[in-house]
Image (spheres, rainbow, N blue to C red):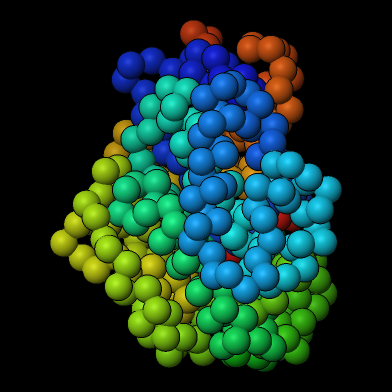
Amino acid sequence: MSTFSPTGWTQDFTPDDQCAFLFPGTGSAGVPDLRALSRTSPAAHRIVGDIVDAVQEGLPGDGWPSLREILLEDPGGYRQAARRPGVAQLSAYTTSVAVDRVLRAEGVPLGFAVGQSFGEIAALVCAGVFSVSDGARMAVSLVGVLSRRGAGGGMGLLEADEDGTQACIDQAGVPEVVVACLNAPGVTVVSGPDEPLEAVLASAQKAGVRAVRLAVPYLSHHPAMTGADDEWYAMIRAFPQRPLEVPVYSPVRGRAYHDGEDLHRALTDCIVKPVRLPEILLAVHQAGATAFAEAGAGNALCQCARLTLPGVPTLAPLRERPRPSGHPGSPVSKSAAGVHPVPPPDPLERPRLD
């Protein structure tokens, strides 16, 4: 399928297709280019502006920048503004909701939603469970809890499966480091205090395993964060929970959510428990998803989908620059001859996958 213009986003879907929207974690690939998204059509321009304004309404009035200014009017000021803790995460949340709304308005057939860690907030908002403004309030409070309770730790990515990653942890002799996220076959994220984390990365590199420290300045998906989940739950439990309009699959709970459960508590699981993305991508595919779309600034989760389900069509509207529909530069096309994806980029070139 094409990934560039509004008409190209839908031209290869059939009435039977269902797309799973993937909502990434706190990382993003550079500055979210919402201005480019807003220029793809008059409807997109209106939708993006409305979402930015709705998120702004959810912010406390203590010095937060104007999101309309840094994301739409003057993106050159984004990096300076993002030095404030929480701005990058809130911008990622805004971007996810805006991309979701634009894709659906343009006719991309949403069938499922999958949120990765922090991205579960946007996934549930887009499924109608929480309002856009309440989702922004949740995002702000989560960053505060993680920054305070997870200080002195971080995360790292290893190009290894879970067993290989655990072997690096064991070799380093630092049980304080744990497997935090399984992102794709052969791509694993660990979490732990700063010094033990560096020891694991050094152990991996010594063993010939490619490893990098991620730009995540706190612990997450770590048992040491027990208590932080209850703290955040107390902050968000009063936000109204509405019925699910779309099936939302959780890589933390390993299944689809249902209306009878406390989805506020489900969100807080992400602070302590690990993410297992491949099994959820497989489950969503088996449930009927015929394509995967990145509701975010990059294409990291599309890469994970292609590594987990080789040949699956993917759509990353903010990563590729606009070209005419069917242009040979399209990263994935679906035709009568079959699916023709380009090989996924190097997994270690991905942004933060937490």
Give the position of the N terminus as an image quadrant.
top right
Q: Nearer the viewer, residue 321 or 164?
A: 321
Residue drawn at (25%, 49%), measured in percent from left and top?
Answer: 244
Residue 90 higher or lower than 176, as above or below? above
Q: Is residue 87 visible?
A: yes
Quarter where residue 257 is shown: bottom left
Residue drawn at (64%, 11%), measured in percent from left and top?
Answer: 326
Q: Nearer the viewer, residue 50 or 130?
A: 50
Residue drawn at (38%, 68%), measured in percent from left and top?
Answer: 267
Q: x%, y% of residue 204?
A: 75, 73
State the residue lying farthest toward the top: 336
Tag count:
0
Q: Nearer the viewer, residue 118 or 43?
A: 43
Q: Is 201 situated left or right of 114 in this image?
A: right
Residue drawn at (44%, 27%), measured in percent from left and top?
Answer: 105
Quarter where residue 217 is shown: bottom right
Q: x%, y% of residue 307?
A: 58, 44
Residue 307 higher or lower than 181, as above or below? above
State the residue lying farthest toward the left: 260
Residue 213 higher or lower than 310, as above or below? below
Q: x%, y% of residue 71?
A: 69, 47
Q: Nearer the viewer, residue 346 or 110?
A: 110
Q: Is residue 96 visible?
A: no
Q: x%, y% of residue 89?
A: 62, 62
Quarter where residue 348 is shown: bottom right
Give the position of the C terminus as an image quadrant.
bottom right
